[in-house]
Amino acid sequence: MAENESSQNNSSAQMSNGNARTQSRPARSRAATRNSATRSSSSSSASEAAMKKQIAELRREVSRLNRALAEQAEDAVETAHGWYDSAADRASGWYDSAADRASRAAQQLRSQAQSVRGQAQSVSETVRQNPGTISTAMTLGGLVGVLIGLAIARSAMPQPDWFQRHWRS
């Protein structure tokens, strides 16, 4: 562009001089202008081609990066699925074992409840059949409990001071 402006300035200066040569110079300057325009267009097309080449390379690089990210995402998804499946299997195993234990405990409680019910029925039948014996046994049990309580209470009490004085003299 600088060449184009300088050639135009030269041609206008020569025309003002009124020289005969000036008539031939504008034709040359026009040709020079065309050549410089051709040069500038060829250099701009070369720079355009270089930019297009860089854009194409960048597009290839972006697509390559997208593929790499997609592969990494697939690996992460597979890993997460593996963790989930593993956790689900463990939880299922824990649930199954807990369910088995609960079932066994329920069966055991049922059988114990039936045996306690049977024992309670036999005790109640015995009480109904022998009311005197049961009341005597309860009275004797109560008296034994009272005597044991008194013995424990007496051994825990310190002896009074007057008792010690009486035996010293």
Image: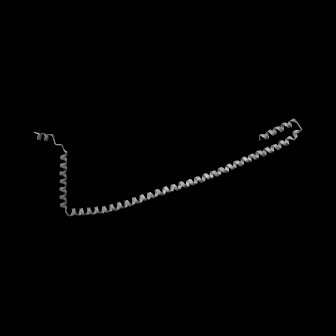
Question: Where the N terminus falls, by quadrant?
Answer: top right
Q: Residue at x 13, y 40 (%)?
A: 164
Question: Where the C terminus falls, by quadrant?
Answer: top left
Q: Please give left or right for residue 67 compared with residue 23 in the image.
A: left
Can you give x and y, in whole percent of width and height, for residue 11 in the image?
84, 39
Can you give x and y, in whole percent of width and height, for residue 4 in the image?
79, 41
* Observer-nearest of 93 and 160: 93
* Observer-nearest of 81 and 53: 53
Q: Is residue 76 above or below residue 163?
A: below
Residue 126: quarter of image: bottom left
Q: Please give left or right for residue 3 compared with residue 88 in the image.
A: right
Q: Furthest-top residue in view?
A: 17
Q: Furthest-left residue in view?
A: 169
Can you give x and y, in whole percent of width and height, for residue 72 in the image?
56, 53
Q: Furthest-right residue in view?
A: 20
Q: Residue at x 48, y 56 (%)?
A: 84
Can you give x and y, in whole percent of width and height, for residue 79 in the image?
51, 55
